[in-house]
Amino acid sequence: MKSMFQKAMGAEFERMHPALQQKYALNSSSDYKVITRGTMHEIKGGSKLVRKVSHLGVKMNFAFPERGEEIPFHMENAAYRDKHGRETMSWRRSFTFPEAVRFFYDKMKEGEEPNTVDNFTDQWGIARLPLNLKATQTGGMLLTSRDMTVHLGKKYWKIPRLLGVRATVLEEYNDQTELFDVHIHIYQPLFGTILSYKGSVEMLFPAIDGGE
């Protein structure tokens, strides 16, 4: 069974590093999950106002005010079908700051249009970021979001670009460190960078029953 990422990228999918192919081949019939662990060398971004508002997102696991350097990072990806039968991939991240452990959860789902992928940035599935997926020349994965929409009932309402959020995720293998370099950037036109973090990680593919 092909994953939603394989369907969306077509032949370009095979240009990625083998470990990235295994990560993004994950689907509801897979017998493994993906564990990413390492260190975020830098977590920054957000004005004082943005970081103050970020406190509101702590309990809902989609924002946090802390920033820092050399922060331990852990992420788990699992695949399943949602209640509507759509392929879904969960992203559960944790950042271990000296003063607290913070979490950032979101989901990616099969898009409304064939061979597309949407990112849902909140636990209710209201805020949607349709994604562009591209294999880089070095075998990395580049995800960039398009215009944000809000899902209410059975309709999607497009958010004006000035009020929406843009996200970029880049993952590339580093031959020197034998780890993956990752860089995530979340941007809002009125407030600038909301959150940016980059670091080095390894990827593991344990069986769902806990074996490796």
Image: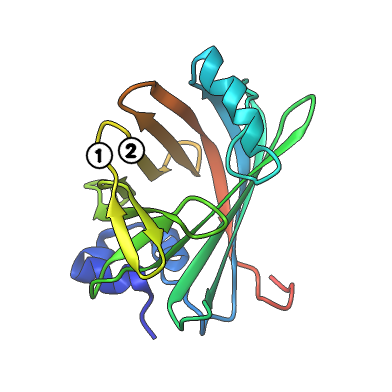
Residue at x-position 51% and y-position 85%: 29
The answer to whether 35 is drawn above or below residue 198 in the figure is below
Instruction: Classify the position of the C terminus by image quarter.
Output: bottom right
Circle 1 sits in a helix, a strand or a loop, which is it?
Answer: loop
- 161 vs 98, left or right, is left
Front in this rendered view, residue 160 or 170: 160
Q: Which colour scheme is used?
A: rainbow
Residue at x-position 31% and y-position 60%: 156
- 85 vs 4, left or right, is right
Please provide percent x and percent y for residue 130: 30, 55
- Tell me the distance, in whole angstroms, between the alpha carbons under discs 2 and 1: 6 Å
Q: What residue type is labelled 1?
A: Pro
Structural crowding at the residue carrying mark 2, measured as other residues with C-alpha within 10 Å and reported as few (<14), some (14–19) or many (≥20) = some
Front in this rendered view, residue 52 or 76: 52
Farthest residue in the right direction? 99
Please provide percent x and percent y for residue 75: 61, 51
Q: On residue 164, which mark appears? A: 2
Circle 2 sits in a helix, a strand or a loop, which is it?
Answer: loop
Please provide percent x and percent y for residue 7: 27, 74
- 194 vs 158, left or right, is right
CB contact under 8 Å: marks 2 and 1:
yes
Residue at x-position 41% and y-position 61%: 152
Farthest residue in the top direction? 48
The answer to whether 211 is drawn above or below residue 41 in the figure is below
Q: On residue 20, which mark appears? A: none
- 197 vs 13, left or right, is right
Q: On residue 160, which mark appears? A: 1
Q: Which amino acid does label 2 sit on?
A: Gly
Please provide percent x and percent y for residue 202: 57, 49
Instruction: Classify the position of the N terminus by image quarter.
Output: bottom left
Structural crowding at the residue carrying mark 1, measured as other residues with C-alpha within 10 Å and reported as few (<14), some (14–19) or many (≥20) = few
